[in-house]
Image (cartoon, rainbow, N blue to C red):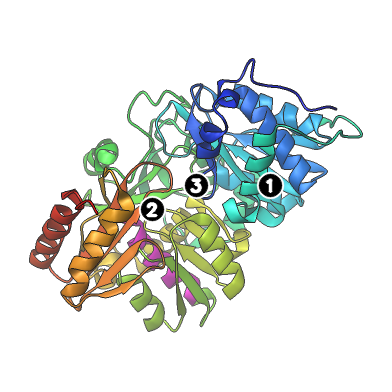
Amino acid sequence: MAATDASATDPSARDGGAGVSALFKAYDVRGVVPDELTPELAYRIGRALVAHLGPPVVAVGRDMRLSSPALAGALIDGLRDQGADVVDLGLVSTDALYFAVGQYGYPAGVMVTASHNPAEYNGFKICREAAQPLALDTGLGAIRDRVLANAFPAPERRGAVQERDVLAAYAEHLLRLVDPAKIRPLKIAIDAGNGMAGRTVPPVFAHLPCTVVPLYFELDGSFPNHPANPIEPENVKDLQRTVLQEQCDLGVAFDGDADRMFVIDERGQFVGGDLVTAMVAVKMLARSPGAAVVYNLICSRAVPETIQRLGGRPIRSRVGHSYIKATMRAEDAIFGGEHSGHFYFRDHWYADSGMLALLTVLELVSEANQPLSAVLRPLDPRVRSGELNTEVADPQATMAQVEAHVRAQGAEIDHLDGVTLSFPTWWANLRPSNTQPLLRLNVEANDPETLHQATTELLALIQRQPSPD
């Protein structure tokens, strides 16, 4: 089939390629629909994926966003027109897509989702065999270049499509990786945020003795109650209130595609993803003594300290799922975690699963026979700022300005991801967002006063415009 000229119908094809290139982020494709991401572009991405990777079969899942059916349909048409057969998984979570690719041996998979972004966004998370993610330097960039060229080799045939429901098998797989018999009849408030957890929680918890208090389980891509981004404090207020009113043992919030998960303790207090990483590491190292555990550089110092104390091998990584997964494979790590609520498991093809992390936390809390806050207390001796985002005109110049200031004060500096600066009683990381025009600041200190002083000083530096050359 000859290349087609999409410029007549696709506004993204008329911008000289700059708009299309901007949609390809460090480890996914993401943009506003229909201003930036269109069905026509989704079609070309499907064709480019097959032309580059050559998979005979591609599994495709989608979330509940209003634009997902049209984008998934166009993507599937592109995959088929380039000669690949398609297994349409329908409405699934991202970790269920990874499960399907790993479990059934599909050579590639695509999840149509924009994760935690607002309703007007959508995008694609692409993986190859064994749920290995594509990043810009491992295939996503090559797919981008083929999309920009809009020229594809003629296929020998048009691929077929079949539907497959994987949710029951997905639930069975996750429950095999924990011991359901050890989980007590806990009372849990779960906020699905009108996202895909509303579809995946029921088949999993049908096999557990827990009582679920559901919030916003109705699939609705307009997000009528709150954005499905639980890392933002305002988006978990309903969950916190419900935990207290219903006297729950804990609360759980998922993001839109249900691969990320955050926990609220029985007092209604938010538990950061790094502390969940420490908790899950406790359980994973009990099962695999001495194993490696990967954590990203935003995580609390409590994470590597916990891993070392339990005899594990802490491995520090850049932020982002493609980097974490590659590091885990290289180190044969049993588990990996991020401050952002992504949790990765070797037995889940090194892919992330918020649901599996939740089941592991439930098992740990059940075995301890203590409130969640009591389980956390010995793991969490420090205080943190949370992620503070600032729009700046020149992120690189701003980071250089901050680095010069703290270096003069004697900070240790590294550049694994952005700028990490360390002092004996506090540390911070400043890095540009991969998906938005922001600088992200995270600060941790040994006590509240030090945290306040350090955070105030760094924010003042960030908000000060760099001097022109």
- The question of residue 284 being in magenta is answered with yes
Dot 2: element: loop
Disc 1 crowd, CA 10 A, few/some/many (<14, 14-19, 20+): many
The dot on residue 308 is none
Q: Are marks 3 and 2 in contact (CB under 8 Å)?
A: no
Report how far apart the C-alphas of labels 1 and 2 lie in the structure. Answer: 24 Å
Point out the tag, 1 or 2, that comes first from the N-terminus: 1
- The question of residue 467 being in magenta is answered with no
Examine the rendering and report whether any part of residue 164 can be seen: no
The dot on residue 100 is 1
Report how far apart the C-alphas of labels 3 and 2 lie in the structure. Answer: 11 Å
Q: In the image, residue 107 lies at what x, y percent?
A: 76, 50
Question: In the image, is residue 40 above or below residue 264?
Answer: above
Q: Is residue 3 left or right of residue 339?
A: right
Dot 1: element: helix
Q: Which residues are magenta?
A: 272-285
Q: Are marks 1 and 2 in contact (CB under 8 Å)?
A: no
Q: What residue type is disc 2 on?
A: Ser
Point out the tag, 3 or 2, that comes first from the N-terminus: 3
Nearest to the eye among marks 3 and 2: give it.
Answer: 2
Disc 2 crowd, CA 10 A, few/some/many (<14, 14-19, 20+): many
- Assign the N terminus to one quadrant of the image: top right
- Assign the C terminus to one quadrant of the image: bottom left
Dot 3: element: loop
Q: In the image, residue 301 lies at what x, y percent?
A: 30, 72
**Residue bearing the label numbered 2:** 340
The extreme right residue here reads 156
Question: In the image, is residue 171 above or below residue 346?
Answer: above
Report how far apart the C-alphas of labels 1 and 3 lie in the structure. Answer: 14 Å
Nearest to the eye among marks 1 and 2: give it.
Answer: 2
Q: Is residue 446 left or right of residue 436?
A: left
**Residue bearing the label numbered 3:** 259
